Image: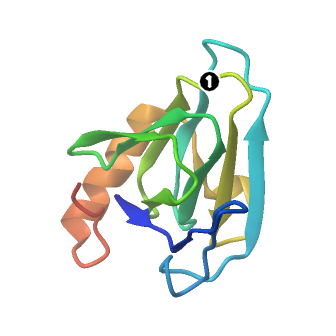
Amino acid sequence: MRLIDLPKILDERGNLSFVEELTQIPFEIERVYWIYDVPGGERRGGHAYRENQEFIIALSGSFDVLLDNGNERKVFSLNRSYYGVYVPKGVWREMNNFSTNSVALIMSSTPYSKADYIYNYEEFLQYAAAKTQSGPDKPKQV
């Protein structure tokens, strides 16, 4: 759970940033999706993944990403397209406070699988506690 600065190429005609799998982000990209037209006051996410990792960028506008590893919660405010937040597997994720016309770009390490999702927060806490007790693949600290 951390912010990652992306390369930023400055140009008087407009700036350019990019992301490469296994370079700026620590996984191979299997799926890309984006969230847009989020009505005021709505939130997205509210789940964790058992296997999937994500990298989230605010391509336009701004929004907050709340990450919770079962021990600590941290909020990342994304409002620039030259950095993003890395979300390891086994971390609860919520997105809220979307500004007008914001666009969230999400790169994922796995294809979509409904079975990978944990939607119930209490179930997530039990999952996180079990992973912490099991050892080396425990949730990462904030």
Residue at 45%, 62% (x, y): give it.
Answer: 86
Q: Residue furthest front?
A: 12
Against 71, is 101 above or below?
above
Among the 4 quarters of the image, the one containing residue 13: bottom right
Q: Left or right: 37 with respect to 127?
A: right
Residue 137 locus on image (x, y percent): 32, 75
Q: In the rendering, at what x and y percent does residue 63 appear?
A: 54, 33
Q: Residue furthest bottom?
A: 22
Residue 114 horizontal/vertical position (percent)? 73, 53
Q: Position of residue 96 (x, y in %)?
A: 54, 27
* Position of 102 relative to 70 (above/below): above
Please give the name of the residue rendered at 44% of the width and 33% of the height, measured from the top-left corner.
121
Q: Amino acid at mark 1?
A: Ser
Report whether residue 112 is seen. no
Which image quarter is the N terminus in?
Answer: bottom left
- Left or right: 120 as drawn, with respect to 19: left
Q: Disc 1 designates what residue? A: 99
Residue 115 visible in the shown view: yes
